[in-house]
């Protein structure tokens, strides 16, 4: 939005207000920026009180502000700001204007706009007249600005207008209504509560984006339609939203997400302005594409004209030289057919964004281009604001539901803690009470033992009687209730059976008969019933074809039915008539089914009732006696030939029954063709061109009709249905087909049986598991679902066997019998072993044992607390005693061993040892300790003679000490408190290990442990190049030699 000069008048959105009194500063380019707070102002008063968000007040002295409207209000200058304390924790903030506030010009401007709208309304709607003041007949009118005014021509001087922050509706409280005929006067007691404030800043310092200016100026669209963007876990039912199992009304969430005049970043609830720049780029591109496509002429793609128009409107590449050329080239690079679809439109926008913002990433550049330009298109702007509103509502719903869920969880935890505390207190109280009661009972029991015994006896007797009575009462009550339930169930069952019986009787009352009939090879179910009421004179015949699952209805009046029955009985005389009851006999009505004919329409069979005479269709070509069934029954066969089929009628003289079937020409031709393919007929061949390849088809020739009749007669039989017991007329191919179907069913049953067995074995393998039993040395089977165990293999496995279980440990949960016991144990199904420890616990125990054994090889037996306390006390006493009396021999020797073994101060230890030897040269403790120090400090780089001299001196000291103390009894305290304790304190120090190795080698005479200590010292000193490593290696070589 480019800035405009304020001298251009009120048409500019940046120009100074026409109501401003400071017109001298109109040459400055300024824009109103909203202040995140609201003011309570009074007409004629320069003092303004800050309402909500007083802490966000960013006004200072000298700032120019506008009140109530960013463009129609006058300019006011802030003279001062002050903060006053009302209470201990509350304060008020107020500002002072350079002149009294005047709201009259805004009211007059709004009134003039209202009169202009009323004039336009009178021009368009002359029948809806208003009075001269533009007020309706009711005397009150509500303007667009939210004021409610009376019909008086002047606002009284003594009035107060008070408004609410929640809406733009104001109340006019009139204190005195006299002088109503006076000319309009200026209201002086108008108080505006919660009105917004704008500060005027220079255009150059306004860094807001166009959409933010639109929102701050109140031009953002308000009537929006959008779809709520709820999370995947949300459940929406009607007008309710459920998140975290918290239902919340959609209207409540929408009312929370309304626009407020405060700082959106500090608002409690989410606002759409916070999510405007978070709308997906794809959504903006898609809406922009739709908006540009809807430009005249509307189409589904964007051509070069619309692209050029969009580029000019949005100012694409204005900072690039030769803008028009670059815009056209961008269009041509992405489109060769001069049409843009959505993907190409996005690609061309990415090219333009990259050229306009080359220093940004592609997606960031595209977002900056869209949010600075195309989001201000009307349609795109409305859709983006709608999407931002939906995102804000979604986040607000999630936050509110999460807050409610957290509050509920906190209350539950708090109540739980309070409940546990109360339970503990009650338990403690009950415990104390029980203890006191037991003491009292014990004292009373000692006083009167016999009375207590009798009382306990009575109590036990009463309890036993109550138990017996309760059991008897519960049993009687259960039996009584069970009898009542059974009685009600029998009554319900009887009522249901009675109702079903009545319905069935009503349904079957009108049915005369129902039977199955084959109609030209199609099985059908025929139902004869009365049509309409029970005394109706119309017959309804329903024919149901299972093949197509359809029912065909035929209705016969009494006269037509009588005619068909007379034709059936071959009575042609018109005087012959039958009563309605005689015609309803089932044996007569079954003859009507012989008139049914099946025809195919669109490949599906339909049933037609033939109204011709009952005589068979076609010409009688043969009439003969045949043996039709296996029992030797004789039938009279009549064969009729028509243009479409052959009809076979069999008459049974024994039962006077008739059987009938038909065979179409197409079916006969197919039958003969199949026979010719299966059987090679020997003999003469027909000369007919159609029958050269298939000799059996020669039976269809006109001269072979007798052979065809004989061939068909021999392949016709009467069979009794195994399912229904009725006789049927079947041809040979029908019997072969039924036999093949029976064999197929039998094979299918065998296959299904084998598949069921295989499936059962698979299920058994999944459910059962084989586990080894160590006691019996055999396997047993466990059902993993039921937990049942058995020694025998499941029967359905047959000859198969379950797999051998793996050698692995499994955790099995169990119920501890007493507190402190583990709730799980471990079992190995392959070996049958049981253990309370897991594999990890067992490995850790073994590692701990190995480490303890390794440590015992180095440090000796495990030290107890007394030994540790003795060593620490010895070290502390030695240092303290040497500091007090350094000339005493025992103090000097003890301190020398502490410096030698624990502090590794060999120089100090050597000096103290030499002084002690001079004073007592034959003491075994001093000699052994000094000899160990000499060997531990013998540097290998010295000459061989000097080194040999030191070694010989040390060995001589060892020999002298062994003569004076052969069992090293006097040296045991030094061993325990110095040499072994040094290894415990410094297990990674090679010098401590070397001292211990020399001790075991020369004093304790334990070469095995000395070798381990030497090796450990060599392994710890990884450098192997320092003096310590050389000394250790030298002593180890001497030990090996």
Image (tube, rainbow, N blue to C red):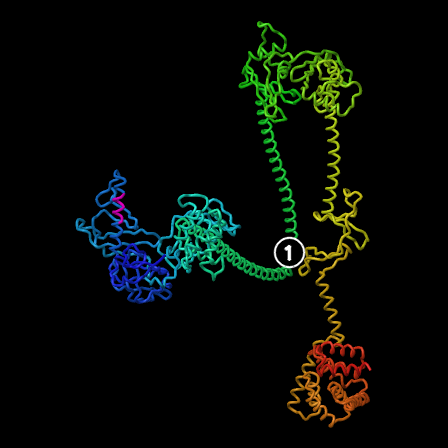
Q: Check residue 225 for magenta coloring.
A: no
Q: Is residue 498 left or right of residue 237?
A: right
Q: Is residue 60 above or below residue 236?
A: below
Q: Is residue 556 above or below residue 448?
A: above
- Where residue 686 appears, as percent x and y from the top left, is 75, 18
Residue 714 falls in which quadrant of the image?
A: top right
Which of the two residues, 999 or 412, is positioned nearer the viewer here?
Answer: 999
The overriding secondary structure of the stretch rendered in magenta is helix
Q: Is residue 799 left or right of residue 573?
A: right
- Where residue 934 appears, as percent x and y from the top left, is 75, 88
- Where residue 228 appears, as percent x and y from the top left, is 46, 49
Q: Quadrant of the C terminus?
A: bottom right
Magenta region: 113-120
Q: Check residue 116 for magenta coloring.
A: yes
- Where residue 689 appears, as percent x and y from the top left, is 71, 20
Q: Is residue 134 left or right of residue 261?
A: left
Residue 189 appearing in the image: yes
Image point (27%, 48%), residue name: 114
Mark 1 = which residue?
452
Which of the two residues, 781 or 280, is positioned nearer the viewer here?
Answer: 280
Q: Residues within 10 Å of mark 1 (few under 14, many from 20)?
A: some
């Amino acid at each position: 939005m480019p800035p405009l000069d304020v001298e251009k008048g009120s048409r500019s959105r940046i120009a100074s207000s026409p109501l401003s009194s400071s017109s001298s500063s109109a040459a400055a380019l300024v824009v109103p920026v909203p202040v995140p707070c609201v003011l309570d102002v009074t007409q004629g008063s320069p003092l303004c009180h800050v309402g909500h968000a007083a802490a966000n007040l960013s006004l200072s002295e000298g700032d120019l502000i506008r009140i109530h409207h960013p463009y129609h209000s006058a300019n006011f200058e802030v003279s001062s700001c002050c903060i006053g304390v009302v209470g201990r924790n509350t304060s008020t903030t107020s500002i002072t204007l350079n002149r009294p506030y005047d709201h009259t010009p805004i009211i007059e401007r709004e009134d003039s706009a209202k009169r202009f709208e009323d004039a336009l309304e009178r021009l368009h709607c002359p029948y809806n007249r208003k009075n001269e003041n533009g007020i309706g007949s009711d005397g009150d009118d509500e303007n667009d600005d939210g004021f409610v005014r009376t019909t008086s021509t002047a606002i009284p001087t003594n009035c107060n207008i008070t408004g609410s922050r929640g809406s733009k509706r104001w109340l006019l409280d009139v204190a005195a209504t006299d002088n109503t005929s006076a000319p309009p006067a200026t209201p002086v007691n108008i108080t505006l509560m919660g009105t917004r404030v704008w500060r005027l800043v220079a255009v150059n310092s306004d860094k807001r984006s166009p959409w933010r200016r639109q929102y701050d100026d109140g031009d953002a669209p308000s009537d929006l339609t959008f779809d709520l963007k709820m999370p995947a876990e949300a459940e929406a039912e009607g007008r309710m939203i459920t998140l975290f199992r918290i239902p919340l009304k959609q209207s409540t969430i929408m009312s929370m997400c309304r626009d407020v005049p405060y700082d959106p970043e500090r608002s409690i609830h989410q606002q759409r302005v916070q999510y405007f720049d978070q709308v997906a780029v794809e959504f903006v591109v898609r809406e922009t594409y739709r908006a540009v496509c809807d430009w005249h002429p509307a189409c589904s793609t964007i051509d070069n004209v619309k692209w050029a128009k969009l580029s000019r409107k949005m100012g694409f590449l204005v900072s690039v030289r030769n803008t028009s050329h670059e815009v056209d080239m961008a269009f041509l690079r992405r489109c060769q057919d001069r049409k843009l679809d959505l993907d190409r439109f996005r690609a061309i926008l990415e090219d333009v964004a990259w050229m306009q913002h080359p220093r940004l990433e592609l997606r960031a550049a595209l977002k900056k281009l869209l949010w600075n330009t195309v989001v201000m298109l009307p349609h795109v702007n409305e859709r983006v604001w709608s999407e931002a509103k939906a995102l804000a509502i979604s986040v607000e719903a999630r936050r509110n539901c999460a807050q409610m869920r957290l509050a509920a969880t906190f209350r539950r935890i708090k109540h739980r803690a309070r409940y546990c505390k109360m339970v503990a207190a009650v338990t403690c109280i009950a415990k104390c009470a029980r203890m006191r009661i037991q003491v009292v009972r014990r004292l009373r029991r000692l006083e009167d033992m016999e009375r207590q015994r009798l009382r306990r006896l009575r109590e036990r007797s009463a309890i036993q009687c109550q138990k017996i009575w309760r059991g008897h009462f519960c049993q009687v009550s259960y039996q009584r209730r069970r009898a009542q339930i059974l009685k009600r169930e029998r009554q319900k069952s009887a009522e249901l059976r009675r109702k079903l019986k009545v319905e069935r009787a009503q349904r079957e009352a009108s049915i005369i008969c129902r039977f199955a009939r084959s109609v030209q090879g199609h099985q059908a179910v025929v139902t004869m019933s009365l049509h309409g009421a029970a005394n109706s004179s119309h017959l309804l015949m329903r024919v149901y074809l299972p093949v197509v699952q359809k029912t065909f209805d035929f209705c016969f009046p009494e006269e037509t039915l009588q005619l068909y029955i007379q034709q059936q009985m071959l009575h042609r005389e018109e005087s012959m008539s039958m009563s309605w009851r005689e015609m309803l006999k089932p044996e007569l009505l079954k003859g009507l089914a012989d008139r049914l004919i099946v025809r195919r329409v669109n490949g599906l069979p339909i049933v037609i009732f033939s109204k011709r005479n009952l005589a068979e269709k076609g010409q009688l070509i043969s009439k003969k006696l045949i043996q039709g069934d296996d029992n030797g029954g004789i039938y009279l066969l009549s064969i009729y030939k028509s243009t479409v089929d052959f009809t076979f009628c069999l008459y049974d003289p024994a039962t006077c029954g008739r059987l009938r079937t038909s065979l179409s020409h197409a079916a006969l031709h197919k039958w003969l063709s199949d026979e010719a393919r299966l059987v090679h007929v020997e003999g003469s061949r027909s000369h007919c061109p159609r029958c050269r390849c298939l000799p059996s088809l020669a039976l269809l020739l006109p001269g072979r009709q007798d052979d065809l009749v004989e061939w068909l007669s021999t392949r016709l039989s009467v069979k009794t249905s195994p399912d229904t017991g009725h006789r049927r007329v079947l041809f040979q191919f029908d019997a072969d087909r039924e036999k093949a179907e029976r064999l197929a069913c039998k094979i299918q049953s065998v296959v299904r049986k084998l598949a069921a067995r295989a499936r059962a074995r698979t299920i058994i393998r999944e459910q059962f598991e084989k586990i080894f039993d160590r006691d019996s040395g055999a396997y047993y089977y466990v059902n993993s679902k039921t937990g049942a165990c058995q020694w025998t293999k499941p029967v359905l496995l047959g000859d198969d066997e379950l797999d051998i279980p793996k050698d692995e440990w499994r955790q099995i949960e169990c119920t501890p019998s007493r507190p402190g016991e583990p709730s799980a144990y471990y079992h190995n199904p392959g070996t049958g072993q049981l253990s309370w420890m897991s594999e990890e616990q067992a490995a850790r125990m073994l590692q701990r044992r190995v480490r303890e054994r390794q440590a015992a090889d180095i440090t000796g037996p495990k030290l107890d607390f007394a030994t540790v306390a003795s060593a620490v006390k010895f070290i502390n006493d030695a240092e303290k005693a040497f500091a007090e009396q350094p000339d005493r021999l025992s103090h000097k020797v003890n301190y020398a061993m502490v410096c030698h073994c624990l502090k590794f101060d060999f120089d100090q230890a050597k000096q103290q040892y030499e002084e002690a030897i001079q004073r007592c040269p034959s003491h075994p403790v001093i000699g052994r300790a000094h000899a160990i120090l000499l060997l531990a400090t013998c540097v290998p780089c010295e000459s061989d003679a000097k080194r040999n001299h030191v070694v010989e001196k040390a060995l001589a000291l060892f020999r002298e000490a062994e003569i004076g103390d052969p069992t090293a009894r006097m040296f045991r305290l030094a061993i325990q408190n110095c040499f072994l304790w040094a290894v415990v304190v410094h297990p990674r120090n090679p010098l401590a290990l070397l001292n211990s190795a020399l001790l075991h080698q020369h004093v304790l005479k334990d070469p095995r442990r000395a070798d381990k200590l030497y090796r450990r010292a060599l392994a710890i000193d990884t450098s192997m190049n320092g003096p310590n490593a050389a000394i250790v290696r030298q002593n180890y070589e001497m030990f090996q030699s």
